[in-house]
Image: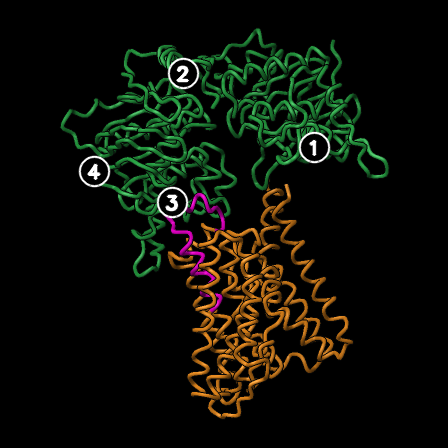
């Protein structure tokens, strides 16, 4: 029996009225990589944050290295050798790598720094072998390297337990693989890695044991060898998974109206001579690796980024100098990739969020007709099956999938002609994902045009009539999704853009 | 489940009504220990004295909800005061009173244009413009007081109606506050104010013309400062460039007392007005009880700390 380093017994946690952990029992051993997987809202991040001291718990016992802990804070956790690496990294961008690693534990005499960080860094790096430049400013580093800084920071404090919350969510496939090597090294060094993720492939590839959570409860903990992706999905959902895509409507015929036509679009955000067209009733995908200009294309068309050259036509009318305001008026909708930062106003409830772009439609002389507003928001919330189904619900407390549905409701309010969708199903649970896919199909069937961006190539292939390949800000080809596989697409991208290592899980955008 | 729900709504309640609770407690306390407090005359007096600050705080709430800050309301008040007095003496008393809100509007728009046009944070921009505005006020008077000994000039500040009980100024205040509440809660402009302060990026991507919303909020605060100045200068029959020094901070204090988030996106006009009334109530209590006024700032400060702590506890508790 290996040493148990952290043990949770009957841990309870509620946020306001919502019970997020229901008497959880869980233990973690020395030297193991222990993945926690589950849908959004299952409580997996909450477990990590409780162990790391970021959240208090309402009931139950937390034991660390065999001792019961009482008041547990990030500071105490760190003193006892437990470090947490957050999804959003907690580094000081303006400081150097070495200064960040030793932040708070610098050698000093009465508060005056001894300036030994670089030497200490070299000693530490000999053990880790990450090969980072200690003098580089953290803000100049790539995300993967910043993560290494966080990991070194944990090791510098001699953390025996390292909690990683969705560490691969902003990494490329290549970088994720390198992170997994680091994780293996940490475990080999006798440390415990608690790896919270929703990427099942990543959990299966790196973990020794995996715990599946659902609705605030532990479904099971088992050795990774006895699990498969399908068995994990089934345990997460509580029922056999339906991961297929809905059937898409037939492609529009050649004389269907061209709703969006872009020619020679060039921007400061990196687009170079991008041309594409979307017909009524057509779902068009944009496929490319991270940084290829997919999101930038959507943003430029919508007027969110300034454009330097090129023509845009919407419904066969010239559209010069796009701005978001003018785009809304022309029937364009942009569903941005980051719903919390770019999509929703989290200080507000559902209703004003949904009606925000279309206040003109429900007001006279600037006065909002609240009865009409309630009626229309009610209809949309029911249509998308948003839970909780309250029109004045606190959207900040909703799960990722339901927030995304609120965002879709917001843009369907005005009946858009062209919908620009950026990562519509990122970070949502499988039920919501299916609902979102149905929505894309509904849009096309109703005669709208859809331009779809997703890091999940499978999603674009499964839902598009046509797809463009993008690389380095340019359209580099077109694919016919039927009869194409993810591997084919990646191979083509790889041919075009050598130097990247494609994998089937290029989902890691 | 039940317990958690109760605790959650309790904190939300505290955050929204802390200022009212303190007002009620203070009023009960005062009426128990002093006969002079709970009289119509004293209460109307409190209302009357709150008027200039209540006007400013009501409009400032919109700026703060939109994610901004206005440190120039006191200086706008100063410019509007001397403009009104100068015009009253040199041209016409009624025109003098009428010009004050327009001066405020102009200076408020100037604030908004500087903030949105130069992409300066409103805190810095209005800190700078408050110095400029004060300078303008001094230039208008040459540094002197302007006495206005004209009977038609004082009706706005000192006039009363309803059998000589309620001040005209209080009516102006009530109408203005009601207008701000309507604007914030029932109009498209109000919705956009909340959206801009709650998540500017999301507002931009929703087609909200964020700059216009910000300029609008600062313009309204300018008008309010000008209107407050008109009432005040009419009351005192005298315009001086240093009028309204410190009003900007008192107005901000009142808005914060009302539980409006300084991070933007949340808040309500009536609560800011309640904040002003609370500040005035404390002032009144010191007068009635004849306590050493040295303790007044201290007490006020502690109450603000308590109110802010209550709202922070409600917001950040996990």
| Mark 4–mark 2 distance (CA, rounded to whole Å) | 34 Å
Are the residues under badges 4 and 2 in a single subunit?
A: yes
Chain for colour orange: B
A330 relative to B220 in the view: left or right: left
- Residue at the spot of label 2: A497
- Residue at the spot of label 1: A53
| Mark 1–mark 2 distance (CA, rounded to whole Å) | 44 Å
Quarter of the figure with residue B34: bottom right
- Asked if labels 2 and 1 touch by Cβ distance under 8 angstroms, the answer is no
Structural crowding at the residue carrying mark 1, measured as other residues with C-alpha within 10 Å and reported as few (<14), some (14–19) or many (≥20): many
Q: Which residues are magenta?
A: B197-222
The nearer-to-camera label among 4 and 2 is 2
- Residue at the spot of label 3: B206
Does the magenta run of residues contain B202? yes
- Which residue: 48% across, 48% down? A348
Q: Position of residue A67 (x, y in %)?
A: 80, 25
Structural crowding at the residue carrying mark 2, measured as other residues with C-alpha within 10 Å and reported as few (<14), some (14–19) or many (≥20): some
């Amino acid at each position: 029996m290996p040493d148990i380093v952290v043990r949770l017994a009957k841990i309870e946690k509620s946020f306001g009225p919502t019970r997020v952990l229901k008497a959880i029992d869980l233990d973690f051993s020395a030297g193991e990589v222990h993945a926690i997987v589950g849908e959004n809202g299952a409580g997996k991040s909450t477990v990590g944050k409780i162990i790391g001291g970021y959240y208090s718990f309402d009931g139950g016992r937390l034991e660390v290295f065999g001792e019961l802990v009482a008041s547990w804070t990030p500071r105490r956790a760190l003193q006892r050798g437990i470090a947490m690496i957050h999804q959003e990294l907690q580094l000081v961008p303006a400081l150097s790598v070495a200064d960040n690693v030793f932040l708070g534990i610098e050698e000093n005499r009465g508060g005056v720094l001894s300036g030994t960080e670089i030497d200490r860094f070299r000693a530490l790096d000999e053990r880790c072998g990450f090969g980072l430049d200690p003098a580089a400013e953290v803000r100049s580093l790539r995300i993967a390297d910043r993560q290494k800084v966080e990991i070194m920071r944990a090791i510098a404090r001699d953390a025996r337990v390292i909690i990683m919350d969705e560490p691969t969510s902003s990494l490329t496939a290549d970088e994720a693989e390198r992170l997994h090597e680091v994780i293996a090294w940490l475990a080999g060094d006798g440390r415990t890695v608690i790896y919270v993720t929703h990427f099942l492939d990543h959990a299966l590839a790196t973990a020794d044991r995996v715990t599946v959570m659902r609705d605030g409860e532990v479904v099971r903990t088992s050795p990774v060898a006895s699990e498969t992706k399908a068995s994990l999905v089934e345990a997460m959902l509580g029922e056999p998974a339906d991961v297929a895509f809905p059937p898409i409507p037939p492609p529009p015929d050649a004389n269907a109206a061209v709703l969006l036509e872009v020619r020679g679009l060039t921007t400061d955000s990196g687009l170079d001579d991008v041309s594409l067209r979307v017909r009524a009733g057509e779902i068009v995908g944009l496929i490319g690796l991270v940084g290829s200009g997919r999101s930038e294309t959507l943003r430029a068309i919508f007027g969110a980024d300034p454009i330097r050259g090129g023509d845009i036509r919407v419904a066969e009318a010239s559209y010069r100098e796009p701005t978001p305001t003018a785009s809304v008026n022309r029937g364009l909708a942009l569903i941005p990739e980051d719903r919390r930062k770019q999509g929703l106003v989290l200080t507000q409830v559902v209703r004003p969020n949904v009606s925000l772009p279309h206040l003109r439609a429900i007001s006279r002389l600037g006065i909002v007709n609240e009865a009409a507003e309630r009626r229309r928001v009610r209809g949309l919330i029911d249509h998308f099956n948003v839970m909780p189904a309250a029109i004045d619900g606190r959207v900040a407390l909703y799960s990722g999938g339901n927030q995304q549905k609120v965002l879709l409701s917001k843009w369907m309010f005005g009946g858009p002609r062209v919908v620009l969708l950026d990562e519509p199903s990122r970070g949502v649970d499988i039920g919501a994902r299916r609902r979102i896919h149905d929505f894309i199909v509904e849009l096309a069937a109703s005669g709208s045009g859809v331009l779809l961006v997703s890091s999940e190539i499978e999603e674009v292939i499964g839902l598009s009539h046509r797809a463009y390949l993008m690389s380095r800000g340019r359209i580099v080809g077109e694919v016919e999704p039927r009869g194409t596989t993810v591997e084919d697409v990646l191979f083509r991208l790889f041919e075009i853009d050598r130097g990247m290592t494609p994998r089937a899980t290029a989902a890691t955008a | 489940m039940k317990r958690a729900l109760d605790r959650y709504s309790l904190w939300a309640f505290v955050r929204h009504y802390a200022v009212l609770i303190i007002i009620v407690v203070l009023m009960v306390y005062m009426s128990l220990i002093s006969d002079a407090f709970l009289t119509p005359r004293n209460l109307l007096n409190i209302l009357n004295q709150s008027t200039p600050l209540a006007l400013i705080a009501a409009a400032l709430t919109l700026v703060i909800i939109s994610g901004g800050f206005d440190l120039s309301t006191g200086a706008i008040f100063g410019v509007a005061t001397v403009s009104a007095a100068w015009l009253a003496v040199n041209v016409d008393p009624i025109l003098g009173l009428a010009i004050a809100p327009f001066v405020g509007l102009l200076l408020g728009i100037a604030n908004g244009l500087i903030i949105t046009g130069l992409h300066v944070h409103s805190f810095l921009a209005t800190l700078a413009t408050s110095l400029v505005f004060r300078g303008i006020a001094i230039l208008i008077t040459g540094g002197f007081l302007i006495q206005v000994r004209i009977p038609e000039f004082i009706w706005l500040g000192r006039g009363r109606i309803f059998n000589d009980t309620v001040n005209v100024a209080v009516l102006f205040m009530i109408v203005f506050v009601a207008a701000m509440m309507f604007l914030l809660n029932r109009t498209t402009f109000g919705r956009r104010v909340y959206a801009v302060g709650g998540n500017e990026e999301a507002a931009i991507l929703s087609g909200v013309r964020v700059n216009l919303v910000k300029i609008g909020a600062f313009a309204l605060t300018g008008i309010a400062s000008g209107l407050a100045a008109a009432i005040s200068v009419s009351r005192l029959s005298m315009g001086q460039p240093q009028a309204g020094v410190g009003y900007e901070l008192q107005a901000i204090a009142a808005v914060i007392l009302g539980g409006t988030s300084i991070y933007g996106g949340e808040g309500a006009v009536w609560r800011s007005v309640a904040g002003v009334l609370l500040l005035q109530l404390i002032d009144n209590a010191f007068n009635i009880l004849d306590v050493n006024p040295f303790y007044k700032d201290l007490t006020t400060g502690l109450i603000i700390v308590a109110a802010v702590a209550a709202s922070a506890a409600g917001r950040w508790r996990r």
